[in-house]
Image (cartoon, rainbow, N blue to C red):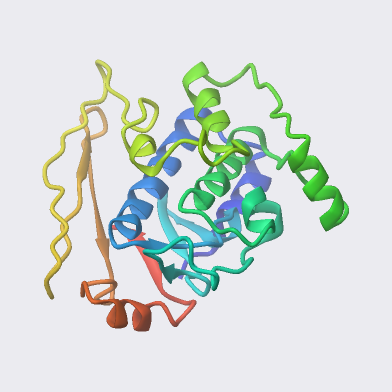
Amino acid sequence: YCQIDLNIYIKQHTYLQEDKAQNYFIQICNALKILYSKNLYHRDLKPSNILIENDIIYLCDFGLSTYITDFNNNNLSMVGSPLYMALEVFNNKYHQKSDLWSLGLILFEMVSGFNFLKSKNLNELVKNINNLTIPNMSHISNSCYKLITLLIEKNVDIRISWEELFIYEWINPIDNNIEKINIIEDIKDIDNNIEITKNIDINNNITSSYNIIEDYYMNSDESSIKDSIKSSNDFLILS
């Protein structure tokens, strides 16, 4: 079992250097890409639900995760951890982009070492979100900071989409040192292994691929997906 989560890791290191934060964030996004392709939403993304072992990210605690195809459903009530919840969730209007807000706060916290929305109570938190001002950070790249602002956007119509996130330049770095090779990206709706994109770091000769353990989300039918997320101890991992 993992001995550390991202929340503890940040506290131990004060904050993460951008290249380290980028590595972790790309892993998180690739894991969420699997869920998104299945219309599954975590709904409780926060540093303490992201485990780390040997620089491998484990996305955990799927207790609030759900299968959603209709975002006009009145049953989508307010759930999550308030400090990482988007404004629309406080208004009982969970949106397809709500988890993206949480991702933005996680990324900000990784590169800064703190959550700038931390408040004394719920009323103060909502007030701080309504009066949103994202602190500037001179030690990170413009591309990283821009992504943070696109994710932590109150207006869901303006907030970056999942599709835009997955192709955003900071998530897909291409330079002379790193070559991103898309070997396979073929998620099959059959009772078989799910094959996901592999990223190869040419310099470090590291090959990584995403898989889902314990037959996680192997079936495409809604009932089996719902059954698979009943346990909050399931992990989505990078192996």
Query: Could you tell me which residue is drawn at 58 percent across and 39 percent down?
Result: 110
Is 222 or 27 nearer to us in this picture?
A: 222
Q: How many marks?
A: 0
Is 132 or 230 nearer to us in this picture?
A: 132
Is 30 or 167 nearer to us in this picture?
A: 167
| Residue 198 position within the rendered picture, expressed as x and y whole percent measured from the top left | 20, 45
| Residue 28 position within the rendered picture, expressed as x and y whole percent measured from the top left | 41, 49
Task: Tell me which corner region of the image, top left, top right, bottom left or bottom right, holds residue 226.
Answer: bottom left
Residue 48 located left or right of residue 182:
right
| Residue 135 position within the rendered picture, expressed as x and y whole percent measured from the top left | 71, 26
Indicate whether 80 appears above or below 183. below
Indicate whether 208 appears above or below 134. below
Residue 103 located left or right of residue 213:
right
Query: Could you tell me which residue is drawn at 45 percent across and 71 percent down?
Result: 1
| Residue 178 position within the rendered picture, expressed as x and y whole percent measured from the top left | 26, 25
Task: Tell me which corner region of the image, top left, top right, bottom left or bottom right, holds residue 106.
Answer: top right
Indicate whether 80 appears above or below 108. below
Q: Quadrant of the C terminus?
A: bottom left
